[in-house]
Amino acid sequence: MMPIPAMPGTATDPTAAAPPLGRVLVADDDDALRALIAAALRRDGFDVVEATSGVECVGYAQPWTFRGIPVEPPDIIVSDVRMPGWSGFEALRILRAGSSPPPVILMTAFASPEAHDLAAQLGAAHLFDKPFEIDDLVSVVRELLTLSRLPGEGR
């Protein structure tokens, strides 16, 4: 007896895309770096939303509705520290004031012990000093997402 072929786009269809590993918000005013990070995360199986400022970052990170359809906030945020409007530190401070904020990874080209201390005080999950290896960032995103989904952990 011949097996029945799977319907295209269904879970049994071998050509169907796997569901994303999680939603990552990438906030950076540097278009080239933001695109590079977003492409690496997408290649690794993440759903990526992009923002160009701290204001956009906070806006996307809050649960909201578009045309009556609820839009889920990100599972993880990757944000530059220096951006127009609110900095990554200011965005992190605002997000931490809300309920159940996602883990936040910060990036800075202006690394200093003070920046690392402030990131830790504000509850950043990690602070990358630029330049850094994109694969290292993707690994930290994957690890944080795994940890946030463990029972009793996360948001």
Image (tube, rainbow, N blue to C red):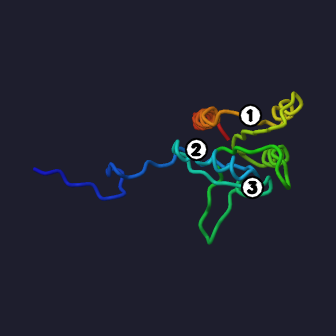
Q: Does the image show residue 151?
A: no
Q: Amino acid at mark 2?
A: Leu
Circles 3 and 2: CB atoms closer than 8 Å: no
Residue named by callout 3:
52
Disc nearer the start of the sequence (3/2): 2
Q: Amino acid at mark 3?
A: Thr
Residues packed near mark 3 inside 10 Å, few (<14), some (14 to 19) or many (20 plus): some
Mark 2 or mark 1: whose residue is earlier in sequence: 2
Q: Residues within 10 Å of mark 2 (few under 14, many from 20)?
A: many
Q: Is residue 80 visible?
A: yes
Quick one: 99 or 2, which is closer to the camera? 2
What's the mark number on residue 28? none
Q: Quick check: marks 2 and 1 in contact, CB under 8 Å?
A: no
- Of mark 3 and mark 1, the one earlier in the sequence is 3
Q: Is residue 104 left or right of residue 94?
A: left
Q: Residue 31, how many percent across, how many down?
A: 71, 53
- Seen at 65% across and 33% down, the residue is 133
The secondary element bearing badge 1 is classed as: strand
Q: Amino acid at mark 1?
A: Phe
**Residue reaching furthest bottom?**
67
| Disc number for residue 41 | 2
Give neighbour class at mark 1: few <14, some 14-19, many 20+ (Cα, 10 Å).
Answer: some
**Numbered disc 3: secondary structure:** loop
- Which dot marks residue 128? 1
Image quarter of the C terminus: top right
Viewer-proximal residue among 16 and 99: 16
Instruction: Residue 116: give x, y in percent of width and height.
Output: 83, 31
